[in-house]
Image (spheres, helix red, strand yellow):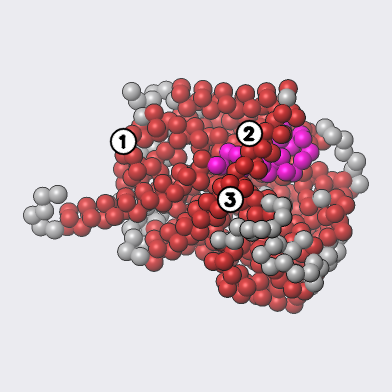
Amino acid sequence: MSNSNKPFDPFIFWTSASITILFVLWSIFFPENMSSTINAVFGWTTKNWGWLYLLTAFSLVIGCFVLMGGKYGKMKLGLPDDKPEFSNFSWFAMLFGSAIAAGIVFWGPAEPAYHYMNPPPYFGGEANTPQAGVDAMTYSFFHWGLSAWAIYAILTIAIGHACFTKNLPLKFSSAFYYVIGDRIHGTWGKILDVFAVFATLGGLATTTGLVALQLSSGLKYHYGMQLGPQSMYIIIGILTLVFTLAVYTGLEKGIKIIGDINMLVFIAVWFFVLVFGPTIFLINLTTNALGQYLIHFIPMSLFTAPGFEGNWIGAWTVFYWAWWMSWAPFVAVFIARISKGRTIRETIAATLILPTLGDFLWYGVVGGAGISYDVTATLKEHGVESAIFAIAQNLPLTGILAVVLIFLITTFFLTSANSAALSLAMFVSGHETPSKNLRAFWGIALGAVAAVLAGTGSLKIIQTASIATAFPLMFLLLLVLYGVFKGLNQYSSQENSNKIPGSVR
């Protein structure tokens, strides 16, 4: 039975909404049990399945380059006569802005500085040395480079090609059309979309929690505001109110304007740090780390840290791969939507190569400044969320720069949260323009899940939530990888047979 005239699919909505509400209630009434359970899931997942996260991400990178350079590269996401809807600049700006969010502002300065004082086991060596700086930047490049973006790219191709050639709804389940066929319209498709909702909530809640921590740290570190334990709830409440209002009223133009301004501010901050920071050091560090990344990419991709104490790979690499996977359903749907009429080759180039270079430039300059100024003492005292503001203290116009950074963090987040709430509503309704009430519900749900996680005040709890929600997606992405090549091969064979005179196929 079709749900085309219904505001939402009852099974998908009530199942995903019930899971969300039960999780929030569990976190409120049994917070210690929630924390211990999430930590147990984290330990079990990363220690027993970390190797598969690494192999999955590496396989997706290989798949992307095969698609981009092989016979499928010229095929379109759509029918042969479909044309791109957006200019190249607007297309990439929307793509990059929706996918990267405030995470790059949080971790860009924090991760290199952290690895600088705690060298990754792959490289080892002495902390706070010139080589430790290069190694720290190399691992930061690895975590925000090809592997991460390949997760988005493969899923984007699967959704885009299936939806625009088979006239399917823009939903996560459509990515599996070439695997299970018309069963995506039945129970299996509904279950897949419930997974997408759950993963998106976990991924966005992780980002919301990180943003709240960073904004709270900025207000405390830079302005001396001693915020109480309730500050996290207040910040998340304000953010939730803003993006829920935006998604409810359908202020797409307003969000687009904010997104455009956000990208300009992002570029301006990068130039400011490059010009007024230790310029030559930043250029040399970025160049050196890029070379080391290219040399060590394959060994790092498969490094499981056997025999090393602790769970470094789980806390860093597996966390990142899981976080990106949890974002993949809603980001891939959005990128597929704006990429209709593009070839597979240019879509992968714009979703894999260009964003990777953009991340390298941001990390090399902003993260490099943190290493040059050695903000490690601040990180030890105030946490990794203080890194960007510690760097600002060493640059001119500190007061103005701090305000700009807070604006950048907020607008990056609002743009992605708005897209996520819309995508969640699309997942449960199957409509490209879901009802206002449905959009508002998922906006509030995002804020509620983020609040109960961030309210713990623990960065680890926030991080592990995304790993728990992304675990099923790891297996699903391997199915998508198989389905992409199977489907494109079938479509290519069918197109070729249709060109042969007298073909009966």
Task: Name the residue tied to disc 1.
Answer: 182
Q: Do tag 1 and tag 2 residues touch (Cβ < 8 Å)?
A: no
Mark 3 is on which residue type?
A: Gly
* Local SS, label 2: helix
Q: Earlier in the sequence, mark 1 or mark 2?
A: 1
- Left or right of residue 503: residue 45: right
Query: Can residue 264 be seen at all in this image of the molecule?
Result: no
Q: Is residue 111 above or below residue 169?
A: below
Query: Can residue 3 be seen at all in this image of the molecule?
Result: yes
* Local SS, label 1: helix
Task: Name the residue tied to disc 2.
Answer: 446
* Residue at (53, 28) in percent of width and height: 16
Confirm whether the magenta stretch covers residue 382. no
* Residue at (20, 57) in percent of width and height: 496
Q: Which corner quadrant of the image does residue 296 belong to?
A: bottom right
* Residue at (39, 32) in percent of width and height: 188
Question: Of residues 136 and 496, which is closer to you in this image?
Answer: 136
Q: Residue 105: where, in percent of width, then height?
A: 70, 54
What's the CA distance linking mark 3 and mark 2? 27 Å
Q: Residue 384: where, in percent of width, then height?
A: 78, 52
* Local SS, label 3: helix
What's the CA distance linking mark 1 and mark 2? 31 Å
Q: Residue 437: where, in percent of width, then height?
A: 56, 25
Viewer-nearest of labels 1 and 2? 1
Task: Name the residue tied to disc 3.
Answer: 50
Per the rendered image, the range of residues in magenta is: 451-471
- Left or right of residue 240: residue 333: left
